[in-house]
Amino acid sequence: MAFELQTRAIRKSFSGVEVLHGVDLDAVGGSVLALLGENGAGKSTLVKILSGDYKPDSGEIHIDGDIRQSLDPVSARQIGIRMIFQEIVDAPTLTVAENIALGHLPRRLGLVDWSTVRRKAVQVLTELEVELDPNAIVGELRVGERQIIEIARELTEDARCLILDEPTAALSSQEVERLFQFIRRLRDRGVAIIYITHRLDEVPTIADRVQVLRDGNVVIRGEVAQFARKELVQAMVGRAVGEVKRPESIARHEPAQPRIRLEAAASGDDFLDVNLEAYAGEVVALYGKIGSGSASVAEALFGMRALTAGKLELNGETMSFGHPREAIEADVGLMPADRQREAAFMVRSVAENLVAPSWPRIARLGALITSGMESTIYARWHDLLGVRSRNDPAQLLATLSGGNQQKVLLGRWLERNSKVLVLIEPTRGVDVGARQEIYKLLRGLAAEGVAIVVSTSDYEEVVQVADRAVVMARGAIVANLDGNEITTERLIAEGH
């Protein structure tokens, strides 16, 4: 008999505010359920109840007909429920093989059996068709590679129900297809899959059934074939959303000097002979799969990666950023791919995060920064950025959704009056509505004369936001696309 997991009338509140209002869900062995909804819709709360991290206030959980009021992490794992979270949770100082074995290290005669650790790592990586050195240190890998390891870790144990929260957010198109092939194999073996994603193009590709949550309520559930993309988007955001169009073409008067430029640039084995320029008032996309070199080029623009050949120019002047601080002082801002590890101060307030790069400018007597100063800056940007929060400058950044965190991190460079913005995977893990708001903000900044470079592995993002696209593969530029040449078909074709 196929595995069945059901929730019935699940309710959950935090601090007196109910976030799930009697939610039903069915996960069936041999089927993939796409669970959709904007950030804050209740998806994470619901699946954390299934994984035993939260206890529901009321309702029931049915496991193969056995009715339970709640689960704990131990019982959930004993049942075979496995959860892969969106944010990476790994041990960066350990090897790939050691990370895959975390939590279930094989032992022999009371000692860790390291040969088995490596053998199992090689086995699962081979099955995923991933070329990673089992002895590589995880902290030295890219975000997408670390995400693969997260998935591999859970797949080494027998799973009856696999919950994946945005597993492809940092993966290349090839890595996504490999993951999908593996998910299909698990589905065909009778595993129940709950697949959370903000990428709606993935839904008909990988899912059999779909369920949409909005504000803690189920608003759509049924077979994927029943619903058009537009219906899913409308259900998620609660209003009709028009099809996203290409941005309007900009008129650039030649000969204009590029705001930032790379000439014959190289950085070790990461990229070679890259020529790139971004003019005031335009958005240039660096498109490529994980490992293509596009993220490395973006990092070089901010001084996070040293050039081994070629040169970097800013407003026609040759620059050599030895440290990101020098880039900031030159009015260049960066939003990295991993906001929690590399950009945000999650346990500090929204106001402090907005002000961070501007501390030297606003400090009195060289060091004094008051909460009043921070609150003034917060008030200047909160509404303009469309940040959805309690409108409290002291609210912790960690309590905001991913999309609103990104808006705050973007706002810090607006406060700094940066003339060049470099963004790496800016909408990773961000819901549909927030993505459109971020794109609108970027287009608005470009209209005000900011030069924007977006490094992304999301071809839909390139189509929606870029004036020009530079396609990279294997550390080199393989195509330059302009205006209406930028289509999903061209990007996919050129990027392989």
Image: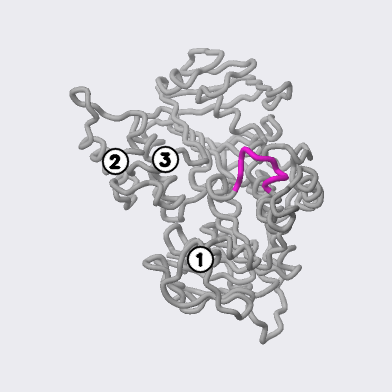
Is the residue under label 2 in contact with that under label 3 (CB below 8 Å)? no
Above/below status of 222 relative to 277: above
Badge 2: residue crowd in 10 Å (few <14, some 14–19, many ≥20): many
Using the image, tell me which numbered label, if any, was put on residue 121: 2
Looking at the image, residue 251 sits to the left or right of residue 488; the answer is right
Asked if the stretch drawn in magenta spans residue 345, the answer is yes
Work out which residue is located at the far front of the displayed protein and give it.
365
Is the residue under label 1 in contact with that under label 2 (CB below 8 Å)? no
Above/below status of 126 relative to 299: above
Residue closer to the observer: 356 or 33: 356
Instruction: Look at 29% across and 46% down and name the residue there.
Output: 134
Spatial CA distance of label 3 from label 2 is 12 Å
The amino acid on which the numbered mark 3 sits, given as a three-letter code, is: Glu
Is disc 1 placed on a helix, strand or loop? loop
- Which of the marked residues, 2 or 1, is nearer the chain's N terminus? 2
Query: Which residue is the site of mark 3?
Result: 150
